């Protein structure tokens, strides 16, 4: 596949200096340094969420290790809204240790862009529509990550083709597509729509390097696209998970009280933070231990996961086929 499909904008591999235009997406609890290093050795870039670490000191230690050991550019995902009480310290750590790029989520990236650019760090911003994409471009974003309706975790409302074409028609920065890619055909299809690159997560959960439980990995093999549902119970924002018996039991909608509290202007920040914390603790328990409370994040591309493999093999099959 030619890397010049999107001739209007710089391809992601050119922007980052990698072999392939792919970011192994930052996945809460799932991403770890071993995965980031393996991604780098396989010709792609990996990104890790800052909120995977309980303290800023631990986060700094991981960044320092990756700067030393990762053979390719790597990035960090920052939640930049008020529910992330460690945001400013995490941003400072990214700048002090000069990560290659920052992916911003769930808030205004303005402060991040200003601080990062002073250190030569690129900033890519999660977007789900052209209105927000134009706003972050005006703030100086280096690229947008177009989160479509097949993304794992927090998905957007629009299909990949529609969103990519919409953003390319309104923005002059690279559009990186996120969601719904699990094989070579889908990879090439997304590039043909005009994407400058791809952010891919779900298919890397069932990898040798991934730290989650065997039960989580096996779920990615045994379940399929039809088993993915959206739930607002984890973070207050719709999030895609595997429809396990436990998810069916507890339902996918917030209760009436939770919905009311989320609309209260004075309490919204604290309610959202508590909902996020409670939901993430539930995900953490399910990800690393065998429990009947199985809430596993994943996207529809689990349809393409047939076995547990090393990241190098996943990347090779993704870009070159079997």
Image (cartoon, rainbow, N blue to C red):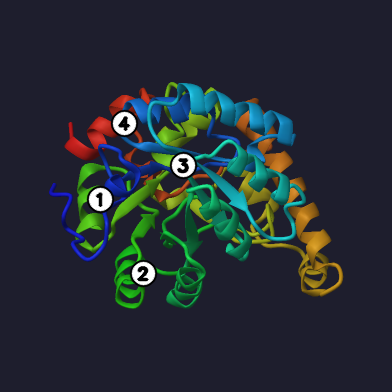
Compared with 138, 306 (above or below) is: above
Q: Earlier in the sequence, mark 1 or mark 4?
A: 1
Compared with 222, 143 (above or below) is: below
Rendered location of residue 185, percent (x, y)? 20, 48
Rendered location of residue 291, percent (x, y)? 67, 30
Q: Secondary structure at mark 2?
A: helix
Inter-mark Cα distance, 1 to 4: 14 Å
Q: Quadrant of residue 255?
A: bottom right
Inter-mark Cα distance, 3 to 4: 23 Å
Query: What residue does disc 3 label?
Result: 100
Can you tell which mark lies on residue 163?
A: 2
Nearer to the camera, 39 or 148: 39
Q: Earlier in the sequence, mark 4 or mark 2?
A: 2
Inter-mark Cα distance, 3 to 1: 27 Å
Compared with 292, 138 (above or below) is: below
Query: What residue does disc 4 label?
Result: 314
Inter-mark Cα distance, 3 to 2: 26 Å
Are the residues at dot 3 and dot 1 in contact (C-beta closer than 8 Å)?
A: no
Q: Which one is closest to the eye, mark 3 or mark 1?
A: 3
Query: What residue does disc 1 label?
Result: 186
Inter-mark Cα distance, 1 to 2: 16 Å
Q: Is residue 68 visible?
A: yes
- Is 186 on the left or on the right of 159, as rendered? left
Q: Secondary structure at mark 3?
A: loop
Of all residues shown, which one is farthest toward the left?
A: 2
Q: Residues within 10 Å of mark 4 (few under 14, many from 20)?
A: many
Rendered location of residue 124, percent (x, y)? 46, 56
Are the residues at dot 1 and dot 2 in contact (C-beta closer than 8 Å)?
A: no
Of all residues shown, which one is farthest toward the front?
A: 118
Q: Secondary structure at mark 4?
A: helix
């Amino acid at each position: 596949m030619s890397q010049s499909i999107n001739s209007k904008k710089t391809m992601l591999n050119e922007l980052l200096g990698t072999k392939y235009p792919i970011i192994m997406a930052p996945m809460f609890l799932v991403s770890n340094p071993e995965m980031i290093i393996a991604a780098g050795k396989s010709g792609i870039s990996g990104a890790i969420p800052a909120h995977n670490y309980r303290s800023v000191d631990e986060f700094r230690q991981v960044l320092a290790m990756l700067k030393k050991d990762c053979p390719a550019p790597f990035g960090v995902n920052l939640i930049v809204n008020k529910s992330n009480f460690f945001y400013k310290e995490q941003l400072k750590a990214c700048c002090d240790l000069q990560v290659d790029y920052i992916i911003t989520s769930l808030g205004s990236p303005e402060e991040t862009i200003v601080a990062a650019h002073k250190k030569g760090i690129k900033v890519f911003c999660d977007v789900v529509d052209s209105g927000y994409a134009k706003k972050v471009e005006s703030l100086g974003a280096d690229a947008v990550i177009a989160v479509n309706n097949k993304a794992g975790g927090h998905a957007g409302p629009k299909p990949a083709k529609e969103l990519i074409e919409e953003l390319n028609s309104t923005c002059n920065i690279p559009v990186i597509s996120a969601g719904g890619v699990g094989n070579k055909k889908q990879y090439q299809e997304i590039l043909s729509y005009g994407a400058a690159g791809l952010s891919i997560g779900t298919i890397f959960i069932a990898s040798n390097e991934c730290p989650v439980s065997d039960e989580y990995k096996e779920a990615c093999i045994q379940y399929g696209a039809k088993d993915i549902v959206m739930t607002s119970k984890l973070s207050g924002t719709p999030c895609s998970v595997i429809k396990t018996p436990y998810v069916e039991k507890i339902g996918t909608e917030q209760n009436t009280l939770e919905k009311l509290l989320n609309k209260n202007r004075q309490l919204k920040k604290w309610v959202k933070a508590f909902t996020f914390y409670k939901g993430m603790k539930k995900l953490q328990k399910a990800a690393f231990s065998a429990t009947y409370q199985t809430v596993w994040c994943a996207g529809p591309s689990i349809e393409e996961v047939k076995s547990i493999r090393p990241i190098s093999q996943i990347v090779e099959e993704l870009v070159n086929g079997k």
